[in-house]
Image (tube, rainbow, N blue to C red):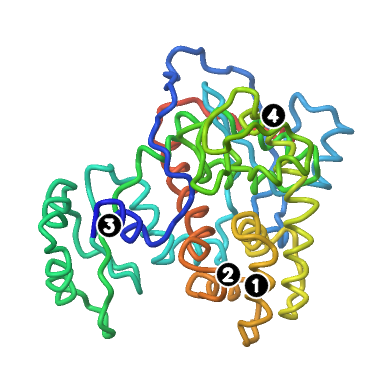
Amino acid sequence: MNLLNLFFVGFLGWTSVLTFGVSELISPTEHPSPKTKIEIIKTDSGNSGFDTITTVAEVDSSVEQNIENEFRYKKYWSSAQHYSIIHLEQDSVALDFLNSANVQFWKRNIQLSEDSFLVVNQRNRQVLDVLPKKAVLSIENGQNLKSLAAIYRNLSTDSIEPTIKFVRGRKSFFNYEGIGPHLEQGMRIFAEHDVNPMICQMLLLIESPSNPRGISVSGAAGHFQLMPSVAKRYGLRVVAPYNRYHAGDERYNFTKSAHVAARLVKGYCIPQAKMVCKTLNLEPDLDALWFNLLVLHIYNAGGGTLNHVAKNIHREFKDGNELIVTLWSTRIGRFGNSSQNYSQLCLASYLSYSEFLESKNWVKNDELRF
């Protein structure tokens, strides 16, 4: 097994863009802290699955009322460098997702340096050890990695014989200092299209957060990883060859690609998610966390793939939350490891980004500006 195979197997099949460049970092200390006094009124969040927050400062009352009606669940958080986040409401459903072994494993992987590997039981995501990269690669080059995995199988507490994977840390890929300042602009654009800005946040935090020129092996490009055919369909200029950066390719234009991504979610992903719900006898709830995670799965894998899963999964679900958890371990058709991992990575990167913001000694302002 060569190094490339080791990496792809070790990363549990995630096929998102594999670019290692880190965009230029800007120190928050270079900019003065905002001093505007913001008064916050919290209101009942209902069943939205997201925090409800409204502001009575610096917002025209008519605009505020419109915002509250359409996007009652948003919470805007900014530092001196204008990093933004929409926080998930900390209800039992969200906590169950966020505290799951799958999401916690991916969060640990996201926060681990690429100089290290996690030794993990693939089935239950139990982390057995952390090894330096040099040691793992040295063992792999000597073709003794299977022997090392056999040793770790004996250390697992799983009642079922585990499959041991060696997963390289991905901290440099998830460059929150680089992508953070872009979130507000992207979320505003999604809100203009009446699309939940949380979806924009999740996409930007996992698609290509370290490299605005990122290109996947399938030709998807830019921060929103738009495929050439999709970008063309929505009116963007796309320049061949697709596996190489070109300044004239509008998928690398953040504003234009954000508008296309929002239109794609609204016009394709959400309707496809409703079709999946209809097949599975689930009531669509556009404000619910599970429904938005389903929309993200469709953005990643395609509506045809998810509808094929829905028609062939042959089981009933008590609610959409159960559907999402089931998708995390489902392999049907083209829905494989990378598809399973997608919403797990969305949640894990959200947690990691939240911790990144909390670790900074920056001034916070809660605002509602969508």
Are the residues flagged by discs 3 and 2 in contact, CB closer than 8 Å?
Answer: no
Q: Which residue is mark 1?
A: 320
Q: Earlier in the sequence, mark 4 or mark 1?
A: 4
Mark 4 is on which residue type? Answer: Thr
- C-alpha distance separating marks 1 and 3: 35 Å
Q: Quadrant of the C terminus?
A: top right
Percent coordinates x, y for residue 59 in the rendering:
79, 27
Q: Which residue is mark 4?
A: 255
- C-alpha distance separating marks 2 and 4: 31 Å
Q: Earlier in the sequence, mark 1 or mark 3?
A: 3
- Mark 2 crowdedness (10 Å alpha carbons): few <14, some 14-19, many ≥20: many
Are the residues flagged by discs 4 and 3 in contact, CB closer than 8 Å?
Answer: no
Please identify, in this view, whether the residue under mark 2 or under mark 4 is nearer the observer. 4
Please identify, in this view, whether the residue under mark 4 or under mark 1 is nearer the observer. 4
The secondary element bearing badge 4 is classed as helix
At horizontal 67% and vertical 29% (from top left) the residue drawn is 250
- C-alpha distance separating marks 4 and 1: 32 Å
- C-alpha distance separating marks 3 and 2: 28 Å
Q: Earlier in the sequence, mark 2 or mark 4?
A: 4
- Mark 1 crowdedness (10 Å alpha carbons): few <14, some 14-19, many ≥20: many
Q: Which residue is mark 3?
A: 6
Mark 2 is on which residue type? Answer: Ile
287 and 166: which one is in front?
A: 166
At horizontal 64% and vertical 63% (from top left) the residue drawn is 294
Percent coordinates x, y for residue 99 in the rendering:
43, 63
Please identify, in this view, whether the residue under mark 3 or under mark 2 is nearer the observer. 3
Are the residues flagged by discs 2 and 4 in contact, CB closer than 8 Å?
Answer: no
Q: Which residue is mark 2?
A: 324
Tell me the quarter of the picture where residue 167 sits.
bottom left
